[in-house]
Amino acid sequence: MKRCDRKRCQILAGARETFLELGFERASVDAIAARAGVSKATVYNHFADKAALFLAAFSEGADNMREALQSALVERPEDDIEHALQRAGESLTSVFVSPIALALHRSAAEAMNLPEIRKMFYERGACLTIDTVATYLARQAEKGILSNIDDARTAAVHFVMLCHGDLVMKVRLGVIPPPTPEQIAATVRSAVTMFLRAYKA
């Protein structure tokens, strides 16, 4: 890896840790530079400002989440649609309620007065997630496994929101502690049942 690439990764790692600990408003470029073990000038050599740093850090996390979801939706010989959706839903919901995602969500909420962050948060987060699920659902509709799907993207929104249930909201509001894998699985199982009642051929 080139020196520039290593330094950029080092800065992004420091930025993620700082944003997650302090939130967007309290995090400063000075604090990020100190956490990354670089000078403030080095940070500005790579990123225009704090918002650009946040966008880059979030974008990388979104890419990792999308890759995990794509892996969960890989079709396996032993799978039926119910098992595939259960696996994907558990993967999604586990990310939504993870401590890192919750801290990132709080940081992003603080930065929502910046249009570029609002746009990025949607495009690199919710939008990519829904598009990934929609691609999978469209394939299943083409095979005749799912039906009544006039718009795969709309069906994907239905699936993702069903997987949220009230679990994600409760965790984000701090009403309940981080859920166990069993609680996540139960929420997703209910979501998959409801989804397949509407869309299974």
Image: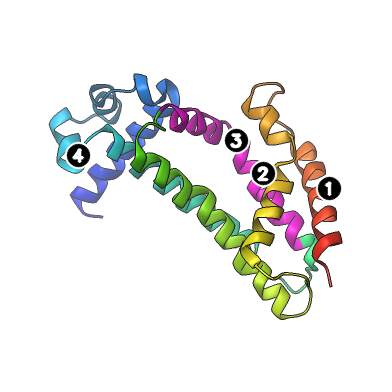
Q: CA distance from mark 1 to mark 4?
A: 45 Å
**In the rendered image, which residue does mark 3 sit on?**
98
The three-letter code of the residue at mark 3 reads: Ser
Total marks shown come to: 4
Q: Main secondary structure of the magenta part?
A: helix
Q: Amino acid at mark 2?
A: Thr
Distance of label 3 from label 1 (alpha carbons) = 20 Å
Part of the protein shown in magenta: 84-110
Q: Indicate the position of residue 67 as horizontal and vertical percent values.
A: 52, 57
How many residues crowd around disc 1 within 10 Å: few (fewer than 14), some, or many (20 or more)?
Answer: some
- Cα–Cα gap, marks 4 and 2: 33 Å
Contact, CB < 8 Å: mark 3 with mark 2?
A: no
The residue that disc 4 covers is: 48
Q: Amino acid at mark 1?
A: Ser
Q: Amino acid at mark 4?
A: Ala
The kind of secondary structure element at disc 1 is helix
Q: Residues within 10 Å of mark 4 (few under 14, many from 20)?
A: few
Q: Which residue is mark 1?
A: 190
Residue 44 appears left or right of 195: left
